[in-house]
Amino acid sequence: MIPLARLEEITDASGLAPRIEGMLPAGARARQLPVRTLLLGMMLALADGRPAHLTRVRRALAGLPEGEQRRLGVLADWKGGPHLLTYRQVEYTFALVTRALGKGQPDGLPPPQLQRACDGLLEASIPAEFKDASASLAVDWSDLESFSRPPPHGTSGCADPEASWGHRKNNLLRDEDELFFGYYLSDAVMVPDEQGPPVPELARRMTASSCRHDPVPAFTPVLTALPAGGIPLGDVLSDSGYSHRVPQNWASPLRTAGAALVQDLHPHDRGPKGTHQGAVIANGNLYCPCTPRPLLELAPLPRAATPAQAAGHDARTGEAARYKLSRLTADDADGYHRVRCPAAAGKVRCPLQPPSMRLERDRPEILQPPEHPQACCTQQTITVPPDVLAKTAQKHDYPSAAWRRSYARRSGAERGFATAKDPASNDITRGWCRLMGLAPLMLFTVTLLVVRNQRILTAWNARQEENQRRAAKGLPPKTRRRRRKTLTALTPAPP
């Protein structure tokens, strides 16, 4: 159970309660239930593994000690004597909050005031010692079903008009997706920086949007607003569902905000995709026009690859890097940079660059240079505008070993959703929240992520203490790898 004092610290640090109170209309008499107590009740209910029902919120508040009830307003003195908070009062206050944070004309996207409330509450759940521990984020989206029944075929009317049909993975052997009715939930989870210390995988930002809207451009403004709040953007790790989007909806705004993209490329974006001044555009880089075609069509290493296959794959990606045009300058204010021929950089031998022919023969050699060389071969440098590699350029060469090691951190986003959908704690499948509309769902989802962060911190602190005890005894840290027993190990040896 998460201590009430810790939840109060988070609520007060976010500054959300007084801000919402200032948005609510003044009634004929004072409300017994303040917004601060309502937020605490929502977190207490979810911290106890209860579903996101207002009846559970009221029950969690009523289960506090009498002194805490009086302090928080759950138990108040009325003319007729002590009055315990009722369900109708919880429902009334929650309706006022969602009406103040929602839109007058709902369209399936969160309004700015609702998104700021969620951002502030999540940021307050991260302890001060971890706020600057890492600038890397792993992002992903998942399904968030509405409790409403879908509209009948051929109609659009239902109890949740903001919800819509969406696709999700079915986790079966076949690759087909299945339909669900509700919203897309996007999440950004803290992961360690490259060569940085380990950090707890805390949810730092989230948003939700109707399935009629693309979740990627709906989440992009949430991430690009981080630098304005004093939070620098480092590595942003995403799968091909993000990199395959239009650059103006994902890659370009994040680069402008200072992020370094580490992303998987969609199969349609891999390999040679045209030329720029004679140089071949492939996998987010420019390559010599005489680069062997198999090196330009390298795919990521399969998950079940053997060490020998991994070594061979890394050797081929290293060979492809020799043909890559070398960058000379960083991006300027407009996103332009300059590159030069790999032979001029001393990475390959080419007759069109006579000084390169004096290099050692361990470098690749261009045996048949182009008959009519273009600018990439004749000029000392060429300028690369930002729109040439806007969609596929990233921090590491794709799919090199450095990219593979860096991209492995993206599994933190998968673990983030796994803990939020854990039936042993809070399972956000259909029915966990029976309130409909984007504002109620986002409020309950962000409080669930706040509670989830506290569980992650508790496990993290316990693990660090255990490692310190083992280190004091001269023992190595306890491994978390699961050991599987094979059929061979279970089969008795023959006599």
Image (cartoon, grey):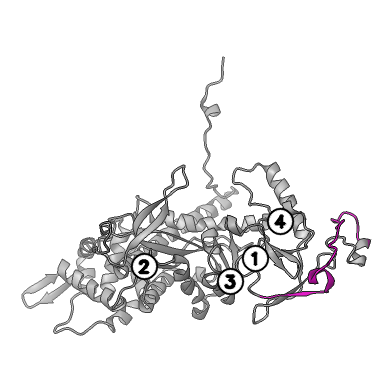
Q: Nearer the viewer, mark 2 or mark 4?
A: 4
Mark 2 is surrounded, within 10 Å at the Cα level, by few (under 14), some (14 to 19) or many (20 or more) other residues, namely few
Query: Callout 3: helix, strand or loop?
Result: loop
Stretch in magenta? 358-385
On residue 259, the disc is 3
Q: x, y percentage for residue 239?
A: 54, 59
Residue 23 on the magenta span = no
Give the position of the N terminus as an image quadrant: bottom left
Mark before the other along the chain sequence, 1 or 3: 3
Give the vertical position of 39 relative to 482 (above or below). Answer: below
Q: x, y percentage for residue 34?
A: 24, 76
Mark before the other along the chain sequence, 1 or 2: 2
Q: x, y percentage for residue 234?
A: 58, 70
Task: Name the foreground residue: 201 vs 187.
Answer: 187
Q: Nearer the viewer, mark 3 or mark 4?
A: 4
Q: CA distance from mark 2 to mark 4?
A: 53 Å
Q: Amino acid at mark 3?
A: Ala
Q: CA distance from mark 2 to mark 3?
A: 32 Å
Mark before the other along the chain sequence, 3 or 4: 3
* Residue bearing mark 4: 296
Query: Callout 1: helix, strand or loop?
Result: loop
Residue at the (10%, 77%) spot, across then down = 78
User: Residue most toward the right?
Assistant: 358
Mark 3 is surrounded, within 10 Å at the Cα level, by few (under 14), some (14 to 19) or many (20 or more) other residues, namely many
Residue at the (89%, 66%) spot, across then down = 353
Mark 1 is surrounded, within 10 Å at the Cα level, by few (under 14), some (14 to 19) or many (20 or more) other residues, namely some
* Residue bearing mark 1: 395
Is 79 left or right of 458, judged from the image as shown? left
Q: CA distance from mark 1 to mark 3?
A: 10 Å
